[in-house]
Image: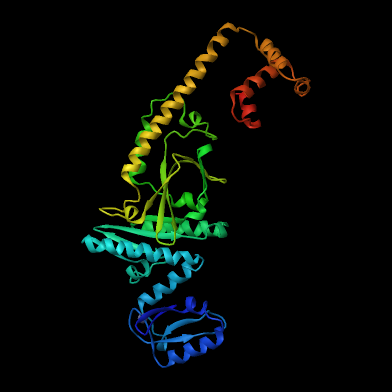
Amino acid sequence: MQEALYEGRLFYLKAYLDTVEDRKSELGKLKKRADKGVFQCPYCNDSLILKAGDIREEHFSHRYSRSCEISEASETYYQQTKRESKLHSVMKEIIYDELKNQEKINEDMLVDYGYIAKAKEKWRYYPDIIVKNGDDEIAITILTNVTANKDGKLVKQIRERNRYYKNKGMQTIWFVENAEMSIDIDHQVIHLWEAELDIAIKTKEDLEWENVLKHLPIEESLFKLFDYHHRKTPEKFDVRSLYYVHSTETEIVFTVHRFIVDQMEYPFRAFALNEGYQMSMSKALLTKKEIQLSDPEVEEKNRELFKEIVRQKALEKKSRKETVIPEQQQTSYTPTQTARKSLQRLSSSEQEMFPLLDELLQSSIFDYVQSASIISAKELSVYLNP
Ligand SMILES: [Zn+2]
């Protein structure tokens, strides 16, 4: 284990050694102190010895190879979170403190570190924090360093942990370090790591959004209305949310992102319902029965705004269509004539690009090019041979 009680305070071995210049001589000093029995297990109060071999990194160990449940769980947790950045433990402590404050005023609530709460059950993975609220248990995990580990291994690990907690009957909440966020509201899209898609959750607010989407007064598909680049429109909108966290010098701030699930394969992307918004930690972590994670007032406003944008867009499209119709009505050209007309509109160099195509085919291609906002060879061939 890495932690010990030293002179009445928690002492973290590796974190401490990372700050010293002469590691070897410092280790000598610490070993001497350990032999004199000054380091104690924070969980069972046994005295600890310091081990510094060649194979395993330096660690504390119970005397005579005895051990206690929590220290074993702590070791499992330490191995599991080793890949996280330094910010991980900072953010974890801040979130823990905030929830602990709420615990004081909410008598049904119990807050603990995951490895301490579940040490007896010897879990394979431990969330950073577990909040027990009546019968509900919530597993909270903070995720940093996702970019540096974008290989499939991390995705697998996260997926496994997520499932593991769910199988234990827990709700899961993942807070992702804000540096991972990639949203492009001009294209109405949020780009995701596969891991992010995996840990996005469906909250009460997401269900409210789904309800709004179900009853939008529009005839065409929502994705088309927003010119959102997509392959197919889903039959049912699946709204989920992601929670990013970042720390400023004085506090940590949460950002909520809500989207409609779309592309479930690389490159992972989804329809962003809005730009997302920030909120303070106390608002995000406010609990009654469950952790709030959102600002209900902002959500209500955002939904109204979204409905208004949809109405505007539908109106724009409709008026554009109406201005086009009279022209179409007077033209009763054959496809060949249409093709010729289109060809006349092209420059001579553009005309040379199509010398070998027969006119009917040309006409169809022009129709396609004019109707599609994004040209795809695959879709064109489907268009030509439906
Ligand atoms: Zn112990």
Residue lying farthest left?
107
Query: Could you tell me if residue 158 is visible in this image?
Result: yes
- Kindly identify the residue that appears in the image at 33 percent across and 39 percent down: 300
Q: Residue 165: x and y, percent? A: 38, 59
User: Where does the image place residue 81, in percent across and percent down from the top left?
Assistant: 47, 67
| Residue projecting furthest to the front | 250
Do we see residue 1 in this rendering?
A: no
- 103 or 206, nearer to the observer: 103
Q: Which residue is at a point 35% across and 42% down the rendered structure image?
A: 299
The N terminus, quarter of image: bottom left
Is residue 176 depicted above or below 372 in this figure? below
Total numbered badges shown on the rendered structure: 0
Seen from the viewer's position, the closer of residues 39 and 119 is 39
At a point 47% along the width and 28% down the height, the residue shown is 221
Q: 174 or 73, which is in the foreground?
A: 174
Q: Quadrant of residue 24?
A: bottom right
Q: How is the image coloured?
A: rainbow
Judge whether 361 appears above or below 326 on screen.
below
Q: Quadrant of residue 252?
A: bottom left
Residue at 53 percent of width and 12 percent of height: 325
Q: Quadrant of ligand 1?
A: bottom left
The relative height of residue 94 versus residue 286 in the rendered view (above or below) is below
Image quadrant assignment for residue 374: top right
* Residue 116: image location, x then y, percent: 34, 70
> In the rendering, at what x and y percent does residue 329 appear?
55, 8
Q: Quadrant of the C terminus?
A: top right
Q: Is residue 310 left or right of residue 105?
A: right
Left or right of residue 352, residue 203 in this image: left
